[in-house]
Image (tube, helix red, strand yellow):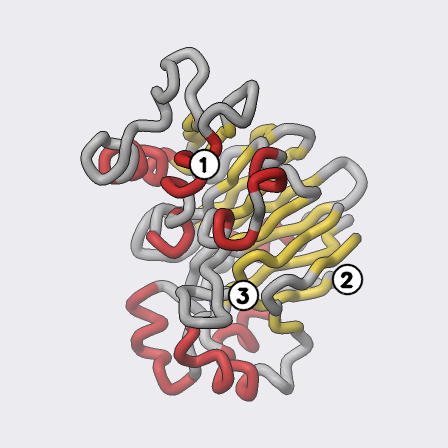
Amino acid sequence: MRLKILGPHGGELPGCKSTCFLVDDRLALDAGALTSMLDLNALAKVDDILLTHSHFDHVKDLPMMSDVMVGRRDSPVTIHSNTECIDTLKANNFNNVLWPDFTRIPTVKNPVFKLRAFKAGSSFKVGPYKVKSVLVSHPVESCGYVISDGAVSMAISGDTGPTDKFWKVLNKVKDLKVLLLECSFPNQLQALADISGHFTPQTIEKELEKFDRRGCEVLLYHLKPAFVAQLKKEVRHLPVHVSELGEEFDF
């Protein structure tokens, strides 16, 4: 598996890109930086997009991608997410008001995007990958994932605050190599993190005690752009790596 960090942040400022990762050049995890980081040829290789949830910083490049992909693929790009997220995209994004309905353009039989919903907590196939979804703790329905290519597995937490279910699932995965773990706010904003369903460095330190790592690398992401420097200082003592824009990992 090859992992590219297209967007390691929880928002945008110069030098910061919203949440987005690319697996093996064909599977996107969230869609916060697809069109701002990939050229047309690279975008056309993306067959599937797996969304953790519906918040704007995770879906914002879907409209821009739909616009530039018309006529560049023989088959639709499939967007996979929990039922609540898919319903939100239908009602509030591809609704012919905010944006044209590219789930029916250029034709109903062969649109740019195909939406595929699943029940949070279920397992399913995405292309060649086996995916296990886990409901995590966030104001909207948000999922973490374990993704396996049959040889190794990686995981992503999605936007979440403290959770037990996610760690219980991860601790059963014997071939887990990489965990993408959100970290949004500095410790001084713990109250904000709690009400918005996010981690701080001090909650991550406690959460990692629940994790049987067995050599798994932990990559932090979703750092809020206004607090990147402060967050990096506050996680220095933790056994984690802060994801950086453009990094690539093979595992």
Residue at (45% x, 27% y) in the render: 70
Task: Determine which residue is flagged by label 3.
Answer: 221
Label 2 close to label 3 by CB (< 8 Å): no
Hey, what amino acid is under mark 3? Tyr
Hey, what amino acid is under mark 1? Val
Extreme residue in the left direction: 97
Q: Residues within 10 Å of mark 2 (few under 14, many from 20)?
A: few
- Left or right of 244 on screen, residue 162: left
Task: Determine which residue is flagged by label 2.
Answer: 214
Give the number of callouts.
3
Depth check: 201 or 26 in front? Answer: 26
Q: CA distance from mark 1 to mark 2?
A: 42 Å
Task: Determine which residue is flagged by label 1.
Answer: 68
Between tags 1 and 2, which lies in front?
Answer: 1
Depth check: 31 or 66 in front? Answer: 66
- Left or right of 55 on screen, residue 136: right
Q: CA distance from mark 2 to mark 3?
A: 21 Å
Depth check: 241 or 36 in front? Answer: 36
Q: CA distance from mark 1 to mark 3?
A: 27 Å
